[in-house]
Amino acid sequence: MRQSMLSAGYSEMYSTTRSSEKLKTLLPRIMEIMDKANVTDTKLIARLKDGIYAKKISYFQKAGIVTDQREDEDLVTSHKYLETALKLRGHLKEKLDVNVNIDLADRIAQARRALYAKEREIEINPEAAVG
């Protein structure tokens, strides 16, 4: 959702804070569409299990002729399905991107220190306030 908002031209801050709110309003509609399409929880779970245990076939060739093949676990696909399952169960949360302008924060802190130092100097030497 956030990426879609960024692609649509929304700012980084707006898309980060509003994407979860927008998703909450869309979720009931998505569930309604899935129900109408007969996409049940049972079907989703069965498909999820298939993906977690995904296989791939590797072919081996010599001079352009297939000489052998082997079935292996498709770890990339399995990972994606497992990640989805963990998110659905609430065991894995989306990462929240927060951009902080460290340079600006450093400048503010530096200005505050300088102001504090100037105030202390004036307390110690009132004549310094004139300069």
Image (cartoon, rainbow, N blue to C red):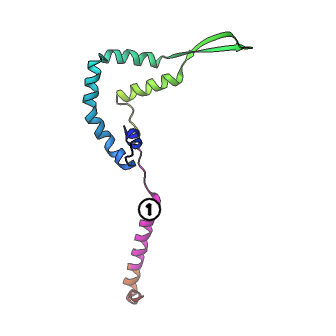
Rendered image quadrant of residue 47: top left
Observer-nearest of 131 and 38: 38
Farthest residue toward the right? 63
Q: Amino acid at mark 1?
A: Leu
Q: Residue 115: give x, y in percent of width and height.
A: 40, 75
The span shown in magenta is 96-118
> What residue appears at the point 71 percent right and 14 percent down from the top-left corner?
64
At numbered mark 1, what does the secondary structure look like: helix, strand or loop? helix
Rendered image quadrant of residue 81: top left
> What residue appears at the point 64 percent right and 14 percent down from the top-left corner?
59
Residue 81, compared with residue 18, is above or below; it is: above
- The 10 Å Cα crowd at callout 1, few under 14, some 14 to 19, many 20 or more, is few
Horizontally, residue 87 falls left or right of residue 70, namely left
Residue 7, compared with residue 76, is above or below; it is: below
Q: Residue 104: give x, y in percent of width and height.
A: 44, 62
> What residue appears at the point 30 percent right and 36 percent down from the top-left corner?
23
Q: Quadrant of the N terminus?
A: top left
